[in-house]
Image: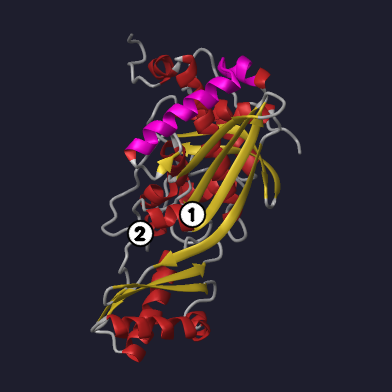
Amino acid sequence: MSELPRIPRSASDDYAPDAVAQRRALAERTAGRALEHVGGSPVPPAAARGNVENLIGFAQVPLGIAGPLRVDTTAGAREVYVPMATNEGALVASYSRGMRLMGAGGGAKARVTREGLSQHPMLVYAGLEQALAAAAHARASEPEFAQLVAGSTRHGKLVALETDVLGCRLLLRLVFTTGDAIGINMAARAAELVSAELARRTGALERYVHGQDVEKRANSRSLVEGRGRSVVAEATIPRAALADLARVTPEQLVAIHATYAQGFAQLGTHNWLVQSANGLAAVLLACGQDIAYLVECAQGQLDFRVDAAGDLYASATLPSLLVGTVGGGSQKGTAAECLALLGCLGDGHANTFAELLGATVLAGDLSLMASFCSHEFVAAHERLGRNRPVHGT
């Protein structure tokens, strides 16, 4: 795998037109296409059809690239620049440093470990006996319901049906594969068909397509069972690289991680990562994803330990990445260009996109935790994250 060059910077003025043009030219060579909309060319209003109502224009968020990021993915080794849309100064620099740390050890490895989008309709019955009977009927009818779903979509499949009885209510957990799309609308339509047919057969008094609404909220079910694509990313960072690039030791990072775990346990949080929301929000926004899924996507676990060679082993587990490389806004304007920069535009790339996201999250957590250990966090934000006038102080 050929190594991508370091991202060019200007010591005199990194926001001057020439400096920006150099980086955009690098991104275009990497993407293998012009990035005209990233460069400021207007997007035709018609491109927003189906994505927004009462259109008045397009929001603008600064877009930077972090990297290079080296990842061993299911589809093979990748080296990419990661597009990040953000207004938080120091964010892109922090993720870039984390990517350099992982690169010093040969890069990250990331794998999708589970795939399946769950929906949770609920049906209401006259009493417990009727709810139990409906649950048994639902389980026995899973093959029939799978055929019903297959008739409603070319890409989605019902791959699991589970039941839970809550008093006189029957909760279904329907799990669908969705191809390379997030597939929310497809899954909701399929869940509606299944719950309607089950209600008809079993005499339900009421039914609700979102009886247990996990959609766009942090929840224990998604943390444990996974929703969308579950990803694990890992990397080994040499002790020397940590000392040189981040001025920390593996032991310091393990110690601060243990302290964070104590705090997270008291919080009762579903997110035991450190800044997953930062990196995910920036990449999801850049790549035309539904940003409201961030609350589910950002859940997960971080692990640090010192390996037998004295280096740092680090991993990030993200059980609920709800992303797609087709559908939604992913094929339009700057989103399509950013996905192309990652080599993830279109069919066949959703799992790779999720794996790159997992590695990106790990890079960000490494860098941020290192800055906490070295007490450089505040100074970095003061240097990079303040909106001072060009000639001000």
Asked if residue 33 can be seen in this view, the reply is yes
Relative to 332, residue 302 above or below:
above
Front residue (pair 158, 256) = 256
Q: What residue appears at the point 35 percent right and 10 percent down from the top-left corner?
A: 391
Q: Secondary structure at mark 1?
A: loop
Q: Position of residue 123 (x, y in %)?
A: 30, 78
Front residue (pair 84, 142) = 142
Cα distance in 3D space between marks 1 and 2:
14 Å
Q: Quadrant of the N terminus?
A: top right
Range drawn in magenta = 241-266
Within 10 Å of disc 1 (Cα), the crowding (few <14, some 14-19, many 20+) is: many
Q: Secondary structure at mark 2?
A: loop
Q: Closer to the N terminus: mark 1 or mark 2?
A: 2
Which numbered marker is on residue 31? Answer: none
Q: What residue appears at the point 39 percent right and 45 percent down from the top-left corner?
A: 270
Front residue (pair 243, 81) = 243
Within 10 Å of disc 2 (Cα), the crowding (few <14, some 14-19, many 20+) is: some
Front residue (pair 334, 251) = 251
Q: Quadrant of the C terminus?
A: top left
In which quadrant of the rendered view does residue 200 lie? Answer: bottom left
Left or right of residue 158, residue 271 in this image: left
Which numbered marker is on residue 215? Answer: 2
Residue holding disc 1: 323
Could you tell me the amino acid type at mark 1? Answer: Val
Left or right of residue 56, residue 14 in this image: right
Magenta stretch secondary structure, dominant: helix
The mark closer to the camera, 1 or 2, is 2
Q: Position of residue 182 (x, y in %)?
A: 47, 60
Could you tell me the amino acid type at mark 2? Answer: Glu
Asked if residue 322 can be seen in this view, the reply is no
* Count of numbered circles in the view: 2
